[in-house]
Amino acid sequence: KFPWTGGSAAVLKINNPSAVTGSAAYLDLAPSSVSGLVDHAYIGAISNASDIPSIIIGTRTGVTAWSERMRIDPNGYVGIGTAAPGKRLEVRDPSPAADGGIIKIANDADTGSNTTFSGLYLGSPFGDDYAVGKKVVSGTSYFQVRDVAGGEMMTIDSSGKVGIGTGATTPRVSLDILATDAMVLPAGTTGQRPAGVNGMIRYNSANGKFEG
């Protein structure tokens, strides 16, 4: 039974009596595969100097080889692909992905003919919340930053065109700013002007003129 008040459910206890930091207790899960071999996966706990164990999950990758897949450390930090997570969730992949991605977030409601959004919601108890992710309109994808109400603050289309401002959902040129105020350009003296750069625009603070 659980040792704390109110615990009345039966439990299975696996104990390693070794009083050494790093000692472990595991539960081996061994289903048979279609090839007739026995696969192995494990879940266990490893002792730490803090007297709060780490929880680990792993699999057997060879006859005598085992690989840890996930760990929850004494602070509650979760690591996937790492045994030493430095944040609440840290994911690492030793092999470079061709598309540069490690974590995938998808919206299964996408049919190719409707509008969907999938992404990360960034929130806190105070201040404004935002969402960062992918909008799909009838099969066309956009990268977006949104406010808490779903207002589209920034959009990047598949050709790299950038739209800034609520409603700038389909940028018409490389940089499309939908606003009524102004845009502040880099300002500096003639001596600070970059050399050998074509197509730039800046404000010369020495003579009070725009220059390119």
Image: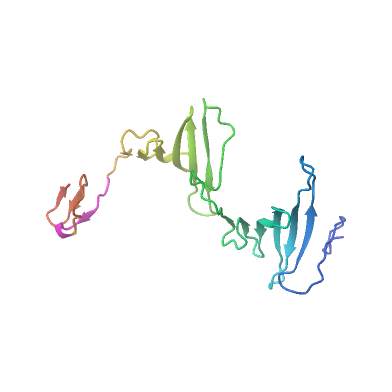
Give the image location of residue 149, x and y in percent: 49, 40
Determine the residue positioned at 64% across, 64% down.
75
Give the image location of residue 10, x and y in percent: 88, 56
Left or right, 10 with reference to 193? right
Image quarter of residue 105: top right
- Say if the magenta span includes residue 184: yes
Give the image location of residue 59, x and y in percent: 71, 53
Left or right, 25 with reference to 189? right
Determine the residue positioned at 41% across, 36% down.
158
Q: Quadrant of the N terminus?
A: bottom right
Residue 206 drawn above or below residue 35: below
Determine the residue positioned at 63% across, 57% down.
78
Residue most toward the top?
113
Residue most toward the left?
207
Segment colored magenta: 183-191
Quick one: 191 or 149, which is closer to the camera? Answer: 191
Left or right, 24 with reference to 94? right
Give the image location of residue 122, x and y in percent: 52, 49
Residue 194 drawn above or below residue 144: below
Quick one: 10 or 131, which is closer to the camera? Answer: 10
Determine the residue positioned at 27% across, 46% down.
183
- Say if the magenta span includes residue 32: no
Left or right, 145 with reference to 108? left
Quick one: 185 or 73, which is closer to the camera? Answer: 73
